[in-house]
Image (cartoon, rainbow, N blue to C red):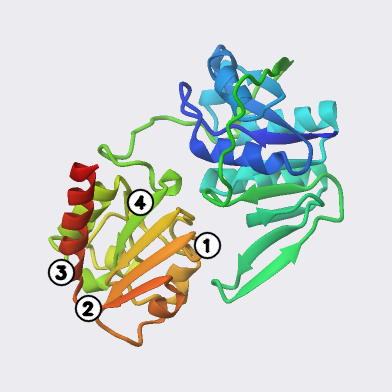
Amino acid sequence: MPDVLVLVDHDGERVHKSTYELLSAAGRLGDPAAVVVGTPGTAARLAQSLARYGATTVHAAESTDAAEFLATPAVDALQLAVREASPAAVLIAATADGNEVAGRLAARLDAGLLIDAVDLDSSGVATQVVFGGSYTVRSQVTRGVPVITVRPGAFEPEERPGGQAVRRTLALPAADPAASARVTARRAAPTGDRPELTEASVVVSGGRGVGGADGFKVVEELADALGGAVGASRAAVDAGYYPHQFQVGQTGKSVSPQLYVALGISGAIQHLAGMQTSKTIVAVNKDPEAPILGLADYAVVGDLFAVAPQLTQEVAARRTAG
């Protein structure tokens, strides 16, 4: 079977969940081959976990430049890997960084590009949600090596204990400072003990109906009881209720968790575009005509400040009993 390249998203020590999802998606098209871009020694630290989730090959593209420049080292590495492996496709997580890398790679390869796929079949046909969530389309690249970004949460990681991966080295060229953006400083975003929004299996989001920054306490308490991440609608973020980094929607982050709980969110198209592929959706809203209630698997017409605390208490009680 042909290789399917997967760009590994990592922090130098840990592989992000979205990469394991990509390896599962790659298995539908061929043999998953991970491309690790990082400083010397990174691939060795990550190889075992990548093999455990299906990677048959680990391409190590390592240099001191890898951490100093944005996007360019990843594009260079993938271009080298494509030349070496002649893959069936290249899969990248549909994040802000991933979409930039994918676009630049497709331009270099003169290849077709598909963005934000939520499903992928064995023939390479991708399912996408487009025009703010109004339509679902199926698309396929017809020119060159398909470059596809996949929405985090769209696939379930499939662990394969005992898997082994062949290590290969890619010689990264030196980055051209005049043609690349250099990283001058890094600052971790405050997340606390909650999972990262795009990787969480449970997301609890609040909207304008929360009423203010203080109202997000009920959102956070329910998220913590469920072991999930906190999200916010654009309306809540624009009103200053919650930081922008937690915005879910077309101009925020796209999520596809196992459970999405929407508290006080009306369900504007902009928000639905970022969460409607969630596996199970629970919505609480006082307005029986709120659009999100029509999308929800479980719709509750009521005051979120009465409903959410009851949910939190019930979840906590079941955890204690269990």
Foreground pick, 140 / 295:
295
Residue 211 showing in the rendered view: no
Considering the numbered disc 2 on the image, is that residue within a helix, a strand or a loop?
Answer: loop
Residue sitting at x 78%, y 47%: 146
* Residue at the disc numbered 3: 305
Residue at which label 1 appears? 277
Looking at the rendered structure, the secondary structure element under dot 4 is helix
- Identify the disc placed on residue 245: 4
Residue 141 percent across, percent down from the top left: 81, 55
Crowdedness near tag 1: few (<14), some (14–19) or many (≥20) residues, C-alpha within 10 Å: many
Quarter of the view holding residue 289: bottom left
Q: Quick check: 124 above or below 137?
A: above
CA–CA distance between discs 2 and 1?
24 Å
User: In this rendering, does residue 229 appear at all?
Assistant: yes
- Residue 32: which quarter of the image? top right
Instruction: Kindly identify the amino acid type of the residue bearing the numbered disc 3.
Output: Phe
Of the residues tagged 2 and 1, which is closer to the observer? 2
Q: Label 2 to label 4, Cα distance in Å?
A: 28 Å
From mark 3 to mark 2, how far is it between C-alphas?
Answer: 9 Å
Q: Earlier in the sequence, mark 4 or mark 3?
A: 4
Question: Circle 2 is placed at which residue position?
Answer: 302
Mark 1 and mark 4: span between their CA atoms? 20 Å
